[in-house]
Image (cartoon, coloured by chain):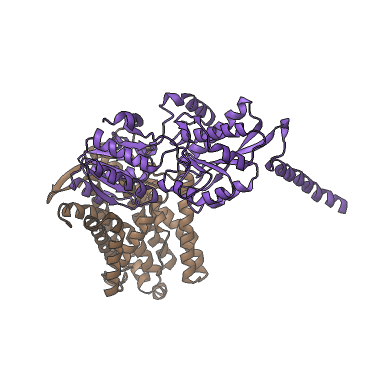
């Protein structure tokens, strides 16, 4: 009896021990199958919660980049993908970052995705000398905190605000613009750049801040009563959709424009295609489904995930590939410190832009795209550089 | 600056909001009347009604926007299905979350925790099953200006909400005042023990009260979803507002809930025209505090049983 019991208990424990040591081996960077060392590229962003879709867009793109890099077969190591869910919230950031730092085979991170989570996570990454390249954190302040290993492949909101202002003033020829933000860190940051820029271009501006709500009918009345020709909403698409509905019901006929947080096909769905028609978006993001330079990526993405790449998928793909190029360059002896040092001088031609950075981690160049809802789909009009006259 | 350009417009949209608050507030007030208990899961009854109406409408409405009499039929269908789903959820809620506690004579706090638990459960199960994105109701009519009054445009949305809500409010008022069921509810509200000695089946009356509140809340959920889309967490804010309306009018008081709802809706909307929108809730709740300072039991007082 006793011996039998011993076998029953001991066998699983022994198996468990083998599995555990296996994990330990690979996570400490030891060799695994094929004699190649395994290192990991991580992604951090929201994978659950209200903003999960945006995070999944990026998660998938990084996954794809890792798979393609391995398939190519010229890596001096085997690249593994891991991810951590921070729900896009500031308090979700540090635990997710900690989880990645604790895995010693993770040498670099694509992410965090959202500005709040980035601000909370970066001190940990800096301390761990862990390179982190965000595809989408656009809050202007982020590069001013002195994080030593933080980079982002999108221009910050002040670039977007300035370019959007030029578009409103010069292309839409606005005389009077109603600027509304949702009082979030992102919304206030964007409207805070947009409004002075508009005034500087001779457009008169009315400001209002509306914390997210459902019923925008009173605000819509206010906008209609103010006789403006353009409305710009700095916030997120779910609220912008309801606001759009209320504005159209109140009889608003002028231009309607939003920022990158508003640009999502869900906006069209939730506002109703008829109401959403003609709405304009500014976004530092490229659209892989329409850009010919991203056609290969869009095709591979669709083949792997059976969905079109979404907002910030191309940026995440570029961020991942730029990091992979550095990992390759550093080679099999890579450490977190070496990777972070080498990334400082990265110069990589991505599908959205050339990825190289100023010393504070800000990407060179400020390409802002303008989109518009046409026939119920968000279509790209071009970059502000092309669209703005003079 | 205040009120100048759109006083009537804002009053009308405020009344429309207020009608919805009133419908939801009745659910709180009725249950409070018979149980002296705030049913914090009522906002999820409202949400369930929204989804019920949404699915019914999605099943029958095609791509084309209906017109005329078909629009009316569809709205009616949505209201009825929303009400039935709301009533059913409220019924189950009472059975699962409250009745077992009542049987064991649990303290009042236990009911509160049970209500919050049920509320969280329902929000998240709906999020898991139906997604966390807002889902728009298909267009049941072309929303536009129906007529103008004092220079203010009255939209189809307002008319639909106002008519549907007014019919239900009058119906409820008559129900409680005239029918046997209403008598039972009032009897339990006045004095549950005596009512039970007089032969009123308390459990049954309580269950019926939940269902009536659920019917109204579910119908309100559909009407709300028609204008503001349906989402798993759609109940929270209207729930808080409706609860406020119920307290404002005098919790447990049916006409008070209606008055409170309308007042809150109008004040909120007019307030926005005076100050930045961020102050909307500050104004609404500031008024609540003021009213309660001078009339601690609400505008019309706390009574369901006595002459309403």
**Residue appearing at x 17%, y 52% in the figure:** B6
| Colour chosen for chain B | brown
Q: Is residue A270 visible?
A: no
**Looking at the image, how many numbered discs can be counted on the residues?**
0
> x, y (%) of residue B88?
42, 53
**Residue appearing at x 44%, y 34% in the figure:** A310
Q: Is residue A9 visible?
A: yes
Name the image quarter holding residue A273: top left
**Quadrant into which the C terminus of chain A falls:** top left
Instruction: Out of B79 and A353, give the one closest to the viewer.
Output: A353
> x, y (%) of residue A359?
48, 41
**Residue appearing at x 47%, y 35% in the figure:** A315
> x, y (%) of residue A349?
49, 28
The reply, left or right, for residue A251 in relation to residue A312 is: left
| Colour chosen for chain A | purple
Instruction: Out of A165 and B213, give the one closest to the viewer.
Output: A165
């Amino acid at each position: 009896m006793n011996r039998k019991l011993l076998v029953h208990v001991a066998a699983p424990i022994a198996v468990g021990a083998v599995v555990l040591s296996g994990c330990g081996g690979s996570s400490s960077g030891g060799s695994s199958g094929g004699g190649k060392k395994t290192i990991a590229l991580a992604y951090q962003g929201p994978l659950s919660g209200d903003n999960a879709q945006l995070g999944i867009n990026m998660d998938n793109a990084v996954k794809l980049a890792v798979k393609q890099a391995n398939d190519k077969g010229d890596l001096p190591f085997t690249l593994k993908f891991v991810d951590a869910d921070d729900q896009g919230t500031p308090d979700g950031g540090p635990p997710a970052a900690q989880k990645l730092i604790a895995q010693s085979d993770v040498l670099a991170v694509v992410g965090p995705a959202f500005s709040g989570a980035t601000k909370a996570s970066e001190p940990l990454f800096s301390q761990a000398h862990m390179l982190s390249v965000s595809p989408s954190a656009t809050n202007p302040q982020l590069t001013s905190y002195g994080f030593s290993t933080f980079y982002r492949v999108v221009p910050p909101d002040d670039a977007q605000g300035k370019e959007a202002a030029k578009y409103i003033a010069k292309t839409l020829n606005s005389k009077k613009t109603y600027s509304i933000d949702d009082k979030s860190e992102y919304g206030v940051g964007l409207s805070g750049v947009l409004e002075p820029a508009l005034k500087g271009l001779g457009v008169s501006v009315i400001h209002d801040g509306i914390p997210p709500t459902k019923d925008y009918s009173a605000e819509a009345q206010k906008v209609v009563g103010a006789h403006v020709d353009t409305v710009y909403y700095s916030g997120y698409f779910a609220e912008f959709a309801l606001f759009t509905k209320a504005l159209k019901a109140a009889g608003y006929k002028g231009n309607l424009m939003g920022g990158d947080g508003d640009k999502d096909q869900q906006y069209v769905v939730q506002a109703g295609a008829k109401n959403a028609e003609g709405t304009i978006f500014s976004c530092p993001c490229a659209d892989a489904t329409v850009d010919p330079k991203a056609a290969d990526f869009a095709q591979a993405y669709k083949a792997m995930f059976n969905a079109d790449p979404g907002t910030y998928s191309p940026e995440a793909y570029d961020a991942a590939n730029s990091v992979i190029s550095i990992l390759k360059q550093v080679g099999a002896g890579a450490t977190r410190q070496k990777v972070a040092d080498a990334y400082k001088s990265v110069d990589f031609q991505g599908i959205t832009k050339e990825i190289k950075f100023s010393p504070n981690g800000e990407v060179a160049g400020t390409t802002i795209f303008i989109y518009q809802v046409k026939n119920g789909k968000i279509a790209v009009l071009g970059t502000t550089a092309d669209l703005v006259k003079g | 600056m205040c009120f100048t350009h759109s006083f009537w417009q804002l009053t009308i949209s405020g009344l429309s909001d207020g009608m919805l608050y009133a419908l939801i507030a009745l659910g709180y007030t009725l249950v409070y009347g018979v149980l002296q208990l705030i049913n914090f899961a009522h906002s999820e009854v409202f949400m369930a009604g929204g989804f019920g109406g949404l699915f019914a409408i999605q099943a029958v409405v095609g791509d084309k926007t209906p017109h005329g009499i078909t629009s009316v039929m569809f709205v009616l269908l949505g209201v009825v299905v929303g009400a039935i789903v709301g009533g059913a959820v409220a019924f189950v809620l009472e059975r699962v979350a409250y009745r077992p506690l009542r049987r064991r004579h649990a303290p009042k706090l236990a009911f509160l925790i049970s209500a919050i638990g049920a509320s969280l459960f329902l929000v998240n199960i709906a999020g898991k099953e139906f997604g966390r994105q807002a889902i728009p109701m298909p267009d049941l009519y072309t929303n536009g200006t129906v007529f103008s009054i004092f220079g203010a445009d009255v939209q189809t949305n307002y008319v639909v909400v106002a008519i549907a809500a007014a019919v239900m409010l009058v119906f409820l008022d008559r129900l409680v005042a005239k029918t046997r069921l209403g008598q039972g509810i009032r009897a339990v509200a006045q004095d549950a023990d005596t009512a039970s000695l007089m032969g009123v089946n308390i459990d049954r009356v309580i269950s019926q009260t939940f269902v009536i509140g659920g019917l109204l809340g579910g119908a309100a959920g559909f009407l709300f979803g028609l204008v503001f889309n349906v989402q798993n967490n759609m109940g929270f804010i209207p729930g808080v507002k409706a609860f406020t309306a119920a307290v404002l009018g005098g919790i447990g008081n049916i006409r008070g809930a209606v008055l409170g709802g309308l007042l809150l809706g109008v004040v909120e909307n007019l307030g926005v025209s005076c100050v930045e929108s961020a102050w909307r809730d500050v104004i609404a709740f500031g008024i609540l505090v003021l009213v309660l300072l001078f009339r601690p039991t609400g505008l019309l007082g706390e009574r369901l049983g006595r002459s309403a």
